[in-house]
Image: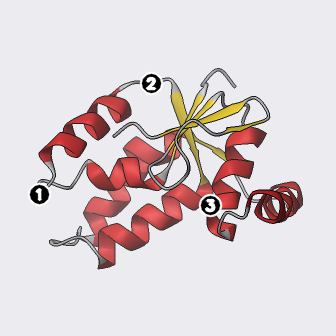
Amino acid sequence: MSAEVFLDTNIFVYCFDSENPTKQAVAKKLVAGRNWFVSWQVVQEFSSVALHRFKVPLKPADLADYIEWRLWPDCRILPSVNIFTQAASIHGRFGFRYYDSLIVASALAGGARKLLSEDLQNGQRIGSLEIRNPF
């Protein structure tokens, strides 16, 4: 895998957040780049937020299009026993919520050097992975 950056769900959510133009601009710039990847979990989380928590929810057809042309082409990590067990280990060691631990485990499994998320500690390192808050 050539991508070195794993994008967390909040990056994609902010692409649609016109009430926060600064974060929206940063998110759109990150997504426009091509040196990133995501996991199945990001696709699932984004879908749920887009359909149920956006101020103006996406229509199912629009969500399907977004998944097909934006998320799925760069979805490189699918569920596996190794991802789930490594997430349990990360949860135990670092005290992250389990779903955040799944994100970290997926980034590590994909060989990411950076995980971009506002949900975790900025600057923290886990092995070769650096967590950065792009906002």
Of all residues, the one furthest to the bottom in this rendering is 52
Amino acid under disc 3: Asp
Query: Residue 124 is drawn in which quadrant?
Result: top right
Q: Secondary structure at mark 1?
A: loop
Residue 131, relative to residue 39: is it above or below? above
CA distance for labels 1 and 3 = 25 Å
Amino acid under disc 1: Glu
Amino acid under disc 2: Arg
Q: Position of residue 8 (x, y in %)?
A: 50, 49
Q: How is the image coloured?
A: secondary structure
Q: Secondary structure at mark 3?
A: helix
Residue 135, relative to residue 51: is it above or below? above
CA distance for labels 1 and 2 = 25 Å
Query: Residue 110 is drawn in which quadrant?
Result: top right
Label 1 vs 2, first from the N-terminus: 1
Disc ID at residue 19: 1
Which residue carries the number 3 mark? 100
Q: Are marks 1 and 2 in contact (CB under 8 Å)?
A: no
CA distance for labels 3 and 2 = 23 Å
Residue 114, relative to residue 43: is it above or below? above
Q: Position of residue 118 (x, y in %)?
A: 44, 50
Disc ID at residue 34: 2
Front-most of residues 59 and 19:
19
Q: Are marks 3 and 2 in contact (CB under 8 Å)?
A: no
